[in-house]
Image (cartoon, coloured by chain):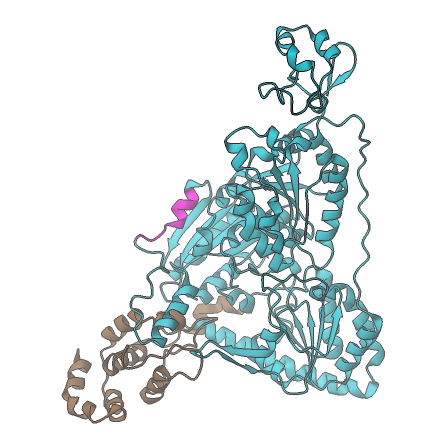
Chain colours: A brown, B cyan
Amino acid sequence: MRGRFLLLTFAPALLAGAASAQAQVAATPGDAANGKRIYMMVGCHLCHGTVGQGGRPGGPHIAPNPLPYEAFARIVRRPPNTMPPYTAIVLSDRDLGDIHAYLGSIPPLPDPKAAAILNN
Amino acid sequence: MSKRKDGSTLNRRGLLKGATVASLAALGSSQAMAQAPAQSRPAGPNVSPADAGRPREVPIVQDNCGSDYMADVIKSLGIEHVACNPGNSFRGLHESLINYLKIDWHTCTHEEASVAMANGYAKIEGKPMLTLAHGTVGLQHASMALYNAWCDRVPVYMMVGNILDAAKRAPGGEWVHSVQDAAATVRDFVKWDDVPGSLTHFGESAVRAYNIAMTPPRAPVLLVLDAELQDGPLPPHEKLTIPRLPKMAPLIGDPGAVAEAAQLLVNAANPVLVADRCGCSQAAIDRLVELAELLQCAVVDLGGRMNFPSRHPLNQSERARAVVREADVIVAFEAENLWGATHTFHDAVERHYDAIIRPGTRLVSIGAAHLYVKANYQDFQRFTEIDLAIPADAEATLPYLIEAVKQRVPLDRKAAMTTRGERLSEAHRQTIKRLKEDALYGWDASPISTSRLAAELWEAIRTEDWSIGAVGSNNRPSWHRRLWDMTKYYHFTGPAAGGGEGYGAPAAAGAALANKKHGRLTVTIQGDGDLMYSPGVLWTCAHSRLPILYVVHNNRGYHQEKLVIQRMANRRQRGIDRSHIGCALDDPFIDYATVAKGLGVASFGPITDPDDLGPALKKAVAVVKRGEPALVDVVSQGR
């Protein structure tokens, strides 16, 4: 909830315009728990998997180490490929920031030694 | 045919043609006496309705039957198995096949399953098994599976029963199970059909149908068998023989055209070989490897069959766009969707597309699809501007193309070809490395990632002689094609070509039937939505002792449909929090292990912890190696 609080703190900046609003969201850590809930609810996981691992065929992996928020938001709002667009009407900036926080919270890849069967 | 007391033969047909007064008088029965007035008149419109169609003496046994001859013809074609849901319109042939021919029989719980089973069998064994159904209700059930086989160019050999003569139909059920033109239901997607009017006609048409089905492009065929022809005795004056099946010469491409294709390949800076349904035998794969190695060129396997070894350095399927983009010559082998391989299509508000290939790229297509096409169903794909079309069987033409290339490779080109091959090999190595890294994403996730599922299953079977019996309609998830070492034609036989759900489970059962005699272990990554179309085939596997491992890719819904609804909802900016409606299989979740157990199949799961998957698969493989089916329900990611 900390992220939500910070977002509300910068509410006047959000009113100034979308670009500045995105910058403010990027400055917040976001609410990862809410982000996970939204990520699942709006169907990000359908193509990108529940932990952002990607799908084959489907979307590319987007976590761990997601794109910086600005680039991430630009793609979500106006995808350059076949990804469905998530406009602000269906996904608020706040929720988008929380999703980004969720993706940022996903732990790093396992040690390849733990998946040694991939070498067979 | 029954012997009468006076020594003359008596059969149903003879009686129905009209009995003489003398013969009826000789019977001397009260029944005959009661019918005497009618006997004084010729048969025809003047016969009283009460007597019409009634034989004077009803035979209660028969010494022979038309369906025994049918069974003999079927045997002569080398058909070894039947998959069938029973129906009384083919009761005569059913009885002959089980008691006279004693053919290997596989009881199915749905006609769609029996035809899909025949489809999966033919793709492994390279020849048809027999499938039977009612000409009406059975054929309607079977129609989707026939369409899948049609789109997949698979020889399904089907016979259906019918009662053509209205005067011979029992009231009620036999009327609703009779039809004037049974094949009309499926004529758009069978290659040939016939309604034999006599046993001689049957013999000729049965052989003709087999020949047509097996001639490229291979496809389903259908014979409609009149019940009278099956059930009745052999006609006394019909001299029956079994027609000889001709030896078919291979359909080889025109030598001049083959030489032209070879010259294009040799002259090209970046030739690419594209194959879709070429790998129907090991010879086809081996020949494609020989050609690719000769040219040191890229190969793109579109996945309609196992066309090219997955770990061969020249296999560039994972970077198909890149190699197609830089190609100056593309030769396609049994690739009907060449437009799709050379374009990208964008499903946006206004649909549009881009060509991947460069202007001036020369396209050559070698395939049997150039020989035969129908109009109504659009499985022939979008028109592609091809420079050289060679109507032929690609597998049969490959040896000649290889020889033509050998004759034309100048010595001064060999170094450049070697360099090209090394560049492609390095790209392949990098691709494999990247794929293994990609597989790590979500490795410990629950639901279980599809890469983990494929990796664990590969680990469980890789030391066996294995075969993927079938995959779902969209060839998804496709990690097995990326991670597994596929070299044999039976390692992979492609998806449901018509996109009809309900293919995977029964087609895999048919593949298991074919693989069984070769001692192979059959596995399938089975979609949950697909399985629910004909789960009864699990019982068939148990009943028929088919050694097959079903690994249910249980993403709890029709995942592809979730994606397309999501696309619509986002495009219309209405949000997708309701897009699961109509697409999800939840509330309640389906417990496939319990379903399988109820159908007599050893089962494991639902598996939700990825660390539990390997041990469960190991146990299931042990069951299959004992000769029985097993199922592992894996709760998995969407893709």
Query: Quick check: B270 above or below B587?
Result: below
Magenta-drawn stretch contains B595: yes
Q: Let me know if residue B520 appears in the view.
A: no
The residue lying at 73 percent from left, 7 percent from top is B26
Residue B557, compared with residue B432, is above or below; it is above
**To which quarter of the image does residue B228 belong?**
top right
Query: Residue placed at 62% from the left, 6% from the top?
Result: B30
Q: Is residue B384 above or below residue B453?
A: below
* Horizontal and vertical percent position of residue B120: 60, 52
Magenta residues span B588-597
| Residue B470 falls in image quadrant | bottom right
Residue under the image location 54 percent in, 37 percent down: B177
Residue drawn where x is 82% and y is 69% of the image: B254
Name the residue nearer the viewer: B409 or A109: B409
Q: Position of residue B311 (x, y in %)?
A: 61, 70
Q: Quadrant of the C terminus of chain B?
A: bottom left
Q: Main secondary structure of the magenta part?
A: helix
Q: Is residue B173 left or right of residue B613?
A: right
